[in-house]
Image (tube, rainbow, N blue to C red):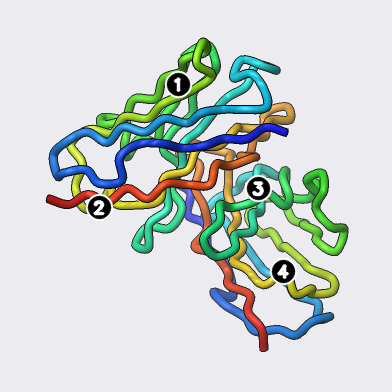
């Protein structure tokens, strides 16, 4: 199985901060990388697919980049509604696997 | 707007079969050659993809669960279902259903149902 790791596991930030989360795959996954946001008690919500394509309706402050094994999710200016857990997911090889998540909370 | 809703027992005894149904509304389960999936989330294992089914019924599963999992589609009811046999406490999780989106060979899950907690306990 492809192992997905994320760093940091958690971070504290303030409104307006730029936030960057890293996701690393244990082997190359080309651009088969998705990012999800999950708030307490809710299902994950797709933010970005194919490493860098913003899902319809997702604010443009979110962006994704990377290919191969290293990927990043950036939030250009953190908003109150962005405090959540963020997960990456690879869909290059079965089984499709998720990262352990990065919790973004309020500093 | 496409919506998905999971339903089924919230408590299952060890060694028995977990059965869940996902009802799709706001669209047809066979629209756009859709694929549909099940994912679960537990504190110990995080998010885990279980398997995916095509509207025609073809499936592919997580190899770690394949011997115990069956996912099927009922196009008349606009539903798809999950069966997981011989459950143990390790199968306790929130179970989500979702639609698989696709662009060329790249795929993702969106939208998701709200999730349903299934506890395995005697």
Q: Is residue A15 above or below residue A63?
A: below
- Position of B76 relative to B71 (above/below): above
Q: CA distance from mark 3 to mark 1?
A: 22 Å
Q: Chain of mark 1?
A: B
Quick check: A64 left or right of B56? right
Name the mark nearer the viewer: 1 or 4: 4
Q: Specify the quadrant that holds the N terminus of chain B.
A: top right
Q: Which residue is mark 2?
A: B90
- Identify the residue position indicated by label 1 in the image: B59
* A27 or B104: nearer the viewer: B104
* SS state under label 4: helix
Report the front residue among A68 and B91. B91
Q: Are marks 1 and 2 on the same chain?
A: yes
Q: Residue furthest bottom?
A: A107
Local packing at callout 1 (Cα closer than 10 Å; few below 14, some 14-19, many 20+) is: some
For mark 3, what is the residue?
A33
Vertical arrangement, residue A7 with respect to residue B34, above or below: below
In which quadrant of the rendered view does residue A101 lie? bottom right
Return the chain for callout 4: A
- Residue pointed to by mark 4: A82
Q: Residues within 10 Å of mark 2 (few under 14, many from 20)?
A: few
Q: Secondary structure at mark 1?
A: strand
The image position of residue A27, as x and y in percent, is 55, 50
**Disc 3 secondary structure class:** strand
Which residue sits at x=61%, y=27%? B25
> Which label lies toward us, 4 or 2?
4
**Mark 3–mark 1 CB contact (< 8 Å):** no
Marks 3 and 1: same chain?
no
């Amino acid at each position: 199985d492809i192992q997905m790791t994320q760093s940091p596991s958690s971070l504290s930030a303030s409104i307006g901060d730029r936030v960057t989360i890293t996701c690393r795959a244990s082997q190359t996954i080309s651009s088969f990388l998705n990012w999800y946001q999950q708030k307490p008690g809710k299902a994950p919500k797709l933010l970005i697919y194919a490493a860098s394509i913003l899902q319809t309706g997702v604010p443009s402050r979110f962006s994704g980049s990377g290919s191969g094994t290293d990927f990043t999710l950036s939030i250009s200016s953190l908003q109150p509604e962005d405090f959540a857990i963020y997960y990456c997911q690879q869909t290059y090889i079965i089984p499709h696997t998720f990262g352990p998540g990065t919790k973004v909370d309020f500093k | 707007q496409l919506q998905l809703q999971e339903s089924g027992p919230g408590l299952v005894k060890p060694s028995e079969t977990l059965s869940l149904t996902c009802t799709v509304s706001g669209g047809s389960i066979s629209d756009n050659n859709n694929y549909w999936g099940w994912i679960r989330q537990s504190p110990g294992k995080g998010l885990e993809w279980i398997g995916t089914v095509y509207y025609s019924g073809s499936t592919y599963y997580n190899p770690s669960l394949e011997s115990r999992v069956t996912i099927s589609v009922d196009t008349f009811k606009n539903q798809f279902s999950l069966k997981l046999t011989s459950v143990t406490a390790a199968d306790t999780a929130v179970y989500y259903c979702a639609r698989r989106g696709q662009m060329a060979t790249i795929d993702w899950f969106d939208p998701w149902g709200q999730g349903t907690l299934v506890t395995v306990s005697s």
